[in-house]
Amino acid sequence: MSDNILVIKLGALGDFVQAGGPFQAIRAHHGSAHITLLTTQPFADIAGAAPWFDAVWIDSRPKLLEVSGWLDLRARLRSGEFARVYDLQTSARSSHYHRLWWPGVAPEWSGIAKGCTLPHASPRRDLMHTIERQAEQLAMAGIEAVPAADYSWAERSDVTALELPETYAIIAPGGAAHRPDKRWPLARFAEIALHLAQSGSTPVIIGAGAEQAMAAEILKAAPTARDVTGKTSLGQLFALAKGARLAIGNDTGPMHVAALTGCATLVLYSKASDPALCAQRGERTVILRETSLDALSAAQVTEALNDLNISQP
């Protein structure tokens, strides 16, 4: 049997970094096997630097009627001669990839694709947090031990070009543009930035390039803050969070990164997402939830930050 293994994890950011434990477990279980990750372009660099994969393939995600794209993807997958596939995305799209081996025989397949050989057949699957769900999926495929994600290698990424101050706090005011109900009002982030600056921690605003306008608004209230939106790689986000006094933000991908480093992390949730299913996990992570984030005051957030015991390193 071939010792080629395929892992599928396409995104998004929070889901990808929370799969670090399963990635490690698959590598440990399969020893010297050649492990390929199928992912999307935003995660290519960090996946290539990770100690878990021998190759990283980029999924072009062909559209439904893009016949040439599907044929190319089919040919590439079949050429890998994979003995087993771990579908950690478990979406309708990734489950459909199981069919691309037809009319031949698909590899052993851990996931939820119809007819797969190692199904995650749990009636509670959709009620489980991402981390427990994937651990159970791997257990059903014969991998019993799934460790906590270890990103210490990413935390050593070079951030000298960011010229960070000695004492700083991360603010992540953004999030998915199509989910405004997951965002705390920007004016209150500005209040917190000013509070942090007055308390001796320089606010460092992170996010995608499209969130630079948010950073500009916060800078009006707290002019000593630093704007690094659109300037950090995923690896640099780990290093940035590792050195931060604290991190505060909405339920968004960078906050998963912060939590995994052990940074004191406060994440703001509305009814739009359920922390029981997707909460950031970390030793010093606190979730603050209101039905609507409009109802969450800056005073409540300040109190929660104090409760984090941010004086710890």
Image (cartoon, grey):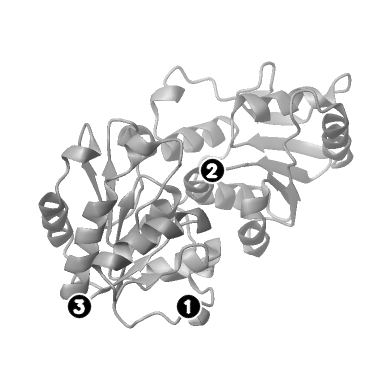
Whether residue 17 is situated above or below residue 130 in the rendered picture? below
Which of discs 1 and 2 lies nearer the camera? The answer is 1
Is 292 located above or below residue 149 in the figure? above
Question: Identity of the amino acid at label 2?
Answer: Ala
Q: How far apart are marks 2 and 3 (CA)?
A: 34 Å
* Dot placed on the residue nearer the N-terminal end, 1 or 2: 2
Q: How many neighbours does mark 3 have within 10 angstroms: few (below 14), some (14-19), or many (20 or more)?
A: few
Q: Where is residue 177 in the image (x, y as percent from the top left)?
A: 45, 41
Residue under pointer 2: 12
The kind of secondary structure element at disc 1 is helix
Image position of 61 (left or right of 183)? right
Amino acid type, callout 3: Gly
Question: Foreground mark, 2 or 3?
Answer: 3
262, 121: nearer the viewer: 262
Res. 44 visible in picture:
yes
From the viewer's perspective, tell me whether residue 205 is left or right of residue 91. Answer: left
**Residue at numbered disc 1:** 162
| CA gap, disc 1 and disc 2 | 25 Å
Report the number of numbered marks: 3
Does residue 285 appear in the picture of this structure?
Answer: no
Label number found at residue 200? 3
Separation of residues labelled 3 and 1 (CA atoms): 19 Å
Residue drawn where x is 67% and y is 51% of the image:
41
For the C terminus, the quadrant is bottom left
In the displayed structure, 97 sits above or below 164; it is: above
Per the image, label 2 sits on a secondary structure element best described as: loop
Image-quadrant location for residue 64: top right
Image quarter where the N terminus lies is top right
In the image, what residue occupies the spot 17% across and 53% down? 301
Q: Please report contact status of discs 1 and 2: CB closer than 8 Å, yes or no.
A: no
Residue at 10% of width from left, 53% of height from top?
299
Q: Nearer the viewer, residue 100 or 181?
A: 181
